[in-house]
Image (tube, grey):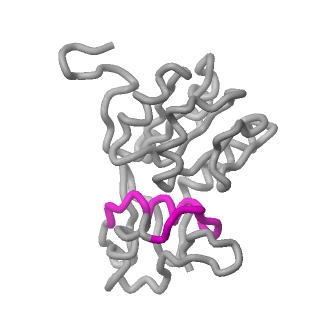
């Protein structure tokens, strides 16, 4: 629903860490809202026709995309190709999901994976409340790409290394030994 230039409800602009759920009935989003701590992640529920608006409402992009659709709305593919968005899918992965996307046959496994990504800790770094990464020593790094790398660790993303420039800048001088690097075998970028 829109009033002037302001979008109301679940698809309103959001700067906190967001998880967008694409489903036909909303049950998956309800389950994740009950499972994941609201202070750490906002769960947005969207139908296939709302996918573009839901993804665009997450600033700078969604932290995670979760779904159970048989087909991925085509409007989502460009965001997945440009940004390090974690992807979890209930049921067979539809065409268009990135290589780092993970599919699950059971809701409990998907919910566990989302929870583990949210609670990840790597070399003293962990996701902060709301958004960003808490670095050792108490500094807050606002980089969305660093959030993604911490949550995906030790896995990574099949994206250009330059996608993680903000993460590299945040880690420079932080005392953290890890940096975004391309794995010579897989070609994926991860914290190494």
Q: Quadrant of the N terminus?
A: top left
In the displayed structure, would residue 169 be above or below residue 53? below
In the displayed structure, would residue 117 be above or below residue 137? above
Residue 30 lies in what quarter of the image? top right
Which residue shows up at 35% across the image and 62% down it?
143
Which residue shows up at 68% across the image and 30% down it?
68
Q: Is residue 99 left or right of residue 92?
A: left
Which residue shows up at 68% across the image and 47% down it?
112
Furthest toward the left, the residue is 4
Residue 7 is situated, as x and y percent measured from the top left of the image, at 28, 22
Residue 91 is situated, as x and y percent measured from the top left of the image, at 77, 34
Furthest toward the right, the residue is 105
Residue 185 is situated, as x and y percent measured from the top left of the image, at 70, 78
Q: Is residue 45 left or right of residue 153?
A: left
Q: Which one is nearer the viewer's eye here, 32 or 102?
A: 102
Q: Is residue 113 left or right of residue 42?
A: right
Residue 73 is situated, as x and y percent measured from the top left of the image, at 57, 29
Looking at the rendering, the stretch of residues picked out in magenta corresponds to 141-161
């Amino acid at each position: 629903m829109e009033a002037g230039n302001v979008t109301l409800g679940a698809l309103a602009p959001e700067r906190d860490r967001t998880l967008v759920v694409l489903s036909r009935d909303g049950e998956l989003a309800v389950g994740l809202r009950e499972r994941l701590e609201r202070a750490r992640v906002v769960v947005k529920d969207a139908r296939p026709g709302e996918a573009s608006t839901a993804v665009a409402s997450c600033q700078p992009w969604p932290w995670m995309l979760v779904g159970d659709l048989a087909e991925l709305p085509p409007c989502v593919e460009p965001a997945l190709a440009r940004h390090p968005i974690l992807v979890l899918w209930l049921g067979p992965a539809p065409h268009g999901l990135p290589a780092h996307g993970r599919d699950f046959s059971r809701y409990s496994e998907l919910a566990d994976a989302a929870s583990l990504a949210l609670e990840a800790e790597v070399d003293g770094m962990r996701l902060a409340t709301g958004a960003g990464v808490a670095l050792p020593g108490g500094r807050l790094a606002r980089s969305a790409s660093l959030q993604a790398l911490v949550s995906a660790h030790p896995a990574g993303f099949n994206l250009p290394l330059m996608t993680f420039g903000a993460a590299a800048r945040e880690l420079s001088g932080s005392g953290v030994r890890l940096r975004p690097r391309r794995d010579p075998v897989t070609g994926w970028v991860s914290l190494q």
